[in-house]
Every structure is written in C-alpha cells, then in structure tokens.
Image (cartoon, rainbow, N blue to C red):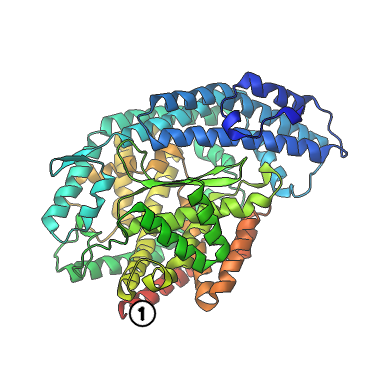
Amino acid sequence: MFTKLSKDPQVFIEWNWEQIKPFADDLVQRPLSSQNLAGWVMDWSDLSRLIAEKYSRLRVATTVNTADQAAKQRFNTFLDQVYTASQAVDQTLKQKLLASGLEPQGFEIPLRNMRVEAAIFRQENLPLLAEEKKLANEYDEIIGAQTVEWNGQEVTPTQLEPVYRSLDRNEREKAWRLVLERKLADRDKLNDLWIRLMQVRGQVAKNAGFPDYRTYRWQELLRLDYTPADCKSFHRAIEQVVVPAAMRMYAKRQEQLGLTQLRPWDLNVDPLGREALKPYKTTRELVEKVSAIFHKVDPQLGEYFDLMRHKGLLDLENRKGKAPGAYCAGYDMVRLPFVFENAVGLHEDVATLLHESGHAFHVLEESHLPYYHQLPVGMEFAEVASMAMELLASPYLLASEGGFYSEKEAARARIEHLEETVLFWPYMVVVDAFQHWAYENHADAMDPKNCDQAWAELWQRYMVGVDWSGLDDLMVTGWQRKLHIFEDAFYYVEYGLASLGAFQVWANALKDQQGAVAAYRRGLALGGTVPLPQLYQAVGAQFSFAAETLQMAVSLAERVIVELSQV
C-alpha cells in the first residue's frame, strides 16, 4: 500500500483527505507484531512527516503574504478537512501502539509523550484546536495590516525601527508614539480576538476534563520535567538577581544620555551618541557575511546555511503584508528548514538570522533520526539551539573574520546583545506571569480591562527603571503586542530558561570554543530521544531555575561588558 504514497511534498500538498485516508486506514487495520513493528512505525512516520510538511508549507504561505486570501483559504481548508481527521487517526495509532506493549528502538521518550497525548485527546476538541489556529492567523492579519505614514510614505512599524535609534530624541519619540498609537487603534479588535481565544481554550480544557487551561496546556506542551511552581520560582529568582542588574543598566544608560528620566523611546539609541550600527546594505550582503560567520563557527554549519541559501529557504526582507516576527519552520519530509524574518538593515537582523539559523541547524542535525516521532523537542531546549548560536557566533562578527564590523563596532554589538539578554529576563517574567494569572483566573481574564490591570501590575513590579508616566494606555495594552500570548499560549518561559542554558554553553566556549561547538552539535543531534535535563547535559549545561545559576550568567555578562567597553 505505502509504495503508492507520494513522498514528494509538492505533490502531497495537493492531496485531500480522501486521497490520504486509505494510507491511514491501512495503518489502523494492519496487524501489529514484533516482526512488522519497524515497518509499521516507518510508514506511520512517513505519513506524519508528509502531513506535518503540508501544514508547514500552507502556514508559511499565509505569513509571507497575509493579504493572500487564497493561501488563507487553502490553510483553513487543510485545518478543517485534513488536520482534524489526521489528528483523530494519530490518536488511534498511538493507542494501538501503546496497547501492543511493543517498543520500537529509540522510542522511550516518544512513548512517554504518546501516553500523555493519548490521555488528553478528545475528539470534540479537534475542531476547537483548528479554530484556535485560525484565530492565530487572524492575529497575524491584524498586525500585518498595520502601517503608518512617515515622511509622506506608507511604512510598516518594523520599517520605522531604525528611527528608534536616531540621535534626535524628538524624532525617535515621534516615531515611537506614531507606531504605538497605530497599534493601540486595534485595541478593540484584539480585545475581541482575545475573548474568542479564551472561550476556545477554556472549552478545550473543559472537554479534556482539566480544571483549567494551564493544566491542560502543560500536558499538551509535554512539560513533564518541570511544573508551574518551578516557573514561579524562576520568576522570584529573576526578581532577586536580574531586576537589580537591569536597574543598574538602565541607570547607566540614563547617565550616559544625560537624562533626568529614561523614557521608552530612549532604550534603543546608542547611549554614547553613535549612529546606529548599519551592518549591511543589501540582503545578499547579509546572507553572504552570515554564511562566512557560520563557516568560522563550524564548517558543517556553514555548509548547512549555504544549502538553505541555494534552495531558496530564506525569506528575510520586511515588506507590507508580511506577518510580524521571525521563525524557523521545519519541512519534515524533505528534512529541511525554512527561515522567515523581517530585516530592515539593523544589527538586530544579523542577530535574528543567527538565532533562527540555530533552529535550522537543529532541524538538520536531527534529520538522521529515522522516525518522525523522535523529532519533537521541547522549546526549552530548542531555544538553546538558537540562543547559544548567537553567542557562539559572536567572536566572528569582525570584518576580518568575514563578518560585518570593525573591532570597536563588534565590541559594541556584543555589549548590546549581552545587555539585551539580561534586560529580557524581567520582560520574560511579565509575559509568563501574565499568562499564569490569565489561566488561573480564566473568568476574570475574559474581561480585557482586567488583563490591562494585571499586565500593568506586573510591568511596574519587574520593569523597573524606565518612566512610562503619561503613557498608561500604551503601557497597559502591552500584552496585546506579544504575539505568543495570542498564538502560542505559555510559550515564552522557554526563552528565559534557554537563555540561561545558552549562557552556560557560552561560558564553556570562552574556555574551549571548538569543544563547546562540538557538544552543541551532539546535543542537537539527539532530537527528542532523551529527557530535557539530559539534552542540557549533552551541550554542557544544567537545566536550572536557580538564583545561583542566574547569578553566574549575570556576573559573566557584566564582566564581559566591562572588558568589551575597553576595546
């Protein structure tokens, strides 16, 4: 039967459920024994890879052009007709394998995950989960349509980000206010979207028999190695260790700028009055120099990046109608990654491409694993792949190494990166703690006014050192501008945990760069075949929520910042 399954994604993407169903039926009906186990799992894996890649390619099409209604319709049709049906079949196949008592080679963690997935599955949730994905697309549409007029031209908010670095304080304030007021204009739309999302998520949890959505989502995300209480412990550790360090950084910036108050539009300008770093003029130059950097980090990683480049797997330039943000999608059948970002000529574009390429390398390093079910990795480790790559690549930003900068410019870029990482941790707490509040208090969080208040309280507690007076509406609606809250609930603490893991990888690299990169690649190659703490151990790090580990990272960052400041 499976000899007729087209493994060409360009063909399979056109298949409807009626064409796919016979292969699913064959897997359901085929007797399972130790003799045919490997072949059965491989056939299931191939079908899963194809469906996953079909999802990825259709989803990508909706993000590269949010105004493409045909792409949106194809994606929605897939969700309604293929996604829901395939998820139901997948549940049947998981139950079949679990009931058999058989264990394919290398399936210890996949089977652990399947037991959880089978336990939370409910047929009546399939259309709701599809609806949730449609609502996430709606968020992209709202954000993707946002433009402002600047100097007589219609531009996206992302395209105005270089102005935030202007040495003219009035100019950057004007740009900042223009963008934030435009975003605020969609407040009612986003409030309405939030209410609908909360209704869907609440019903999903109820259908699955959970007391609240967080408990359900914890299982759905396969967070089997830590608890909500661990996250709250992490929040406290960040408040203890990182918030004071952030306050020191903000105070230093305020002093350098000669200001009596540090305002939100003062956070991106260079505090020493230097023009913003402009590392490249064309996307081609960006790609060529990042390629050179990766070849320095590791020749194989350089080859991986060049493969993506030559196969058209990079969509980097910002444009109207493009979805916000950046991501790396996996095309699981062809075992290749696709990288998406919104580049506008800033150093942040370089950092983002290094980051997303780390995810891409993860896809390529684990591609040797035979089964689709061995691929899924918690984002707590997947983000180590990306964040560690930013740090591992940092020694090669120099033009003399094939990169972008003079020695002083490279030092400046690295200082900015380290400061941003430290300053990110308190913001991460605000985003994560907001979501804990929202789903612990689901009924209250259905009212966006309560969300505004909760966000404001968290902001004032953790984001200390910047004056938001007179900007109340803009501050309290910050939760609307964090796409993860809308599109991928609870996916944010991973960044904080992974950043701590990445710092440990970097600390190892400062002693032995080659050894640290080798361990990094070995860890990525494990895919999802070992538990989360072991993945961290493989790259030379400890999976930790502790204040002591955070203190090590913050002290290292502050020490290196001092050293680089003397270049």
Q: Which residue is located at x 30 percent, y 75 percent?
A: 408
Q: Please state if 140 lies on the left or on the right of 360 as rendered.
A: left
* Pointer 1 local density, CA inside 10 Å: few below 14, some 14–19, many at least 20: few
- Residue 533 in view in this figure: no
Quarter occupied by residue 396: bottom left
Left or right: 318 in relation to 46: left
Against 150, residue 277 (above or below) is below
Q: Which residue is mark 1?
A: 563
Residue sitting nearer the eye, 333 or 386: 333
Residue furthest toward the right? 35
x then y, percent, for residue 54: 56, 33
206 vs 242: above or below: above
Taking the spot 29% from the left edge, 69% from the top edge, the residue there is: 248
Residue 91 in percent (x, y) is at 68, 30
Q: Residue furthest left?
A: 170
* Residue closer to the observer: 486 or 218: 486
At horizontal 70% and vertical 39% (from top left) the residue drawn is 115
Which quarter of the figure has residue 435?
A: top left
Q: Quadrant of the C terminus?
A: bottom left
Up-down: is 524 above or below 394?
A: above
The residue that appears at 36% across and 64% down in the rendered structure is 417
> Where residue 156 sits: x, y (%)?
26, 41
> Which residue type does callout 1 highlight?
Glu
Q: Nearer the viewer, residue 125 or 74?
A: 74
Residue 91 can be seen in this image: yes
Residue 81 position, x and y percent, is 56, 21
